[in-house]
Amino acid sequence: MKTLILDHFEATCERLPDKTAFVDAQGAMTFAQLRGAARAVGTALIAKTSPREKIGFYMDKSSRTVAGFLGAVYAGCAYAQLNLRYPPARIASILDTLGAGVVVTDREHEAALSGAAGGREVLLIEDLLQTPPDEAALARVRAGMIDLDPLYVNFTSGSTGSPKGVVVGHRSVIDFIGCFAELFSITERDVLANQAPFDFDVSVKDIYSGLFTGATVAIVPTAYFTQPVKLMDFLCEHDATVLVWAVSALCFLTTMNALAYRTPEHLRAILFSGEVMPIRHLNRLREALPGATFVNLYGPTEITCNCTYYIVDRDFAPGDALPIGVPFPNERVLLLTDEGREARPGEVGELCVAGTALALGYLNDPERTARAFTPNPLNAATPETIYRTGDLVRLCENGEMVYVSRKDFQIKHMGHRIELGEIENALGAVEGVERACCLYVQEKGRIVAFITGSADKERALSALRETLPAYMIPNALTRLDAMPLNKNGKIDRDALRALLPQARTHSR
């Protein structure tokens, strides 16, 4: 019985030892080489840690980094990738939350880490990889592991200003990846082109789909997402078949007209998540890649990557809502109204999820965990935990679900309850608008919108007045050359909020 991530990984290593597991700018690593490297790192970490400790990794994403992650798992620990762009104070805060006694880095980043490591022992991956595997020690640790042990910790922004660590266990990843790979027919014949940073849970789908099925994961250099020619050359030269990318990365392809330069002819599936996909960009991608299947994935980190999927099966016009689809197998999705009942067709409810894929909770934060992971109010007979996503979703008459907005993006303005996402969707339907984002300035009672693209402000406002009531028309509209993005490729609303003093009010 395969109860641990290592069981699935080693089964693939036995079946395909000489097949390329990961390839990056520095070279390739076969499954056999990856297993050997991971067991070397694991042996070294066993001497420095205790089971179920959390180990921080401060290094660029690479094949060697994956070996480090798996080494932490062989040591019975959980890993957490640290973002190299974070300031030292934030890295130190994350390490404090982790309770990490050791941090793994490489020689390239050793000096940069020194200011944030505190009194923790810093280990170099180059040294760990030279450790002879201790089979007895590895077996002893392995015998004490169970499928509810933590596997990794992903840090996301917290409302208090301090990062919150989402802890995901072996069982949840095994449950999700098994369904994910089967649904989208990912096999050893595939090449997944990894776009996401390793501290973003989109990368979990790349890493573990490869480890479970024998697919090759080609790690795209981060710099290529500002260099469309190099990006397209990389995809073509590595015969990429599957893209599991953030929406913003796919929008980069269309904005830069990258597919006109070169089209990856082996692409068969493009799966996107993280934000609402602008219909204009989706239509351009589908036109350029008519042979590929497009899938809209939805779900937060706390439910292990995704809980619903929608295989795009029809044409959409700008302004149409793209469904978020149906639940993944073994995941129960509920749309709960404020009254605590399930939403009826046409109604909006908060999307909540139950199932094995739920995360273990927030690291060292029982109060926050208790607020988000709550008993299912519809099941009084037996204990059943649901995760409250905070996302508002509409149940359509045809049974499809459509994302509306964040619960905290629902505002009360001029006596009316408004979903900012509805305004963004209306702006996205305006000819010439590439991206749109709305903020609400509570203290001034103002709706502020930002757009990118060729549309001028007056044309956009005029179009809104034809589709929205007067109380939903933004009080200010600013056109930007590009939307600011956060580390995960999503629109950075904090950066937009910093622009608010510059946002000029238009006259109605």
Image: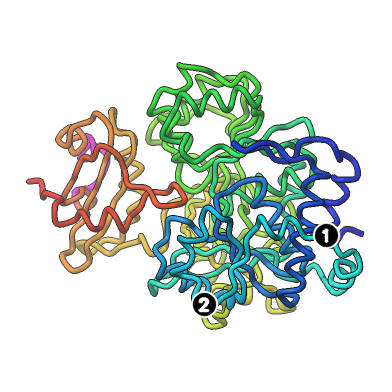
Q: Residue placed at 56% from the left, 76% from the top?
A: 120
Residue 90 image point, x, y percent: 42, 68
Q: Nearer the viewer, residue 304 or 295?
A: 304
- Look at mark 1 in the image and give the residue it sits on: 132
Residue 337 showing in the rendered view: yes
Magenta-highlighted stretch: main secondary structure? helix
Locate residue 354 relative to residue 363 in the image: left or right. right
Residue 1 image point, x, y percent: 92, 59
10 Å neighbourhood of mark 1: few (<14), some, or many (≥20)? Answer: some
Q: Residue placed at 27% from the left, 53% from the top?
A: 496
Q: Is residue 256 above or below residue 376?
A: above
Q: How is the image coloured?
A: rainbow
- Look at mark 2 in the image and give the residue it sits on: 96
10 Å neighbourhood of mark 2: few (<14), some, or many (≥20)? Answer: few
Q: Nearer the viewer, residue 295 or 129?
A: 129
Magenta stretch containing residue 47, yes or no? Answer: no
Residue 372 image point, x, y percent: 54, 73
Do the residues bearing badges 1 and 2 touch, measured as CB atoms within 8 Å? no
Locate residue 395 relative to residue 210 in the image: left or right. left
Residue 115 image point, x, y percent: 43, 69
Q: Which residues are magenta?
A: 463-470
Q: How many marks?
A: 2
Label 1 – label 2 distance at C-alpha: 31 Å
The mark lying in front, picked from 1 and 2, is 1
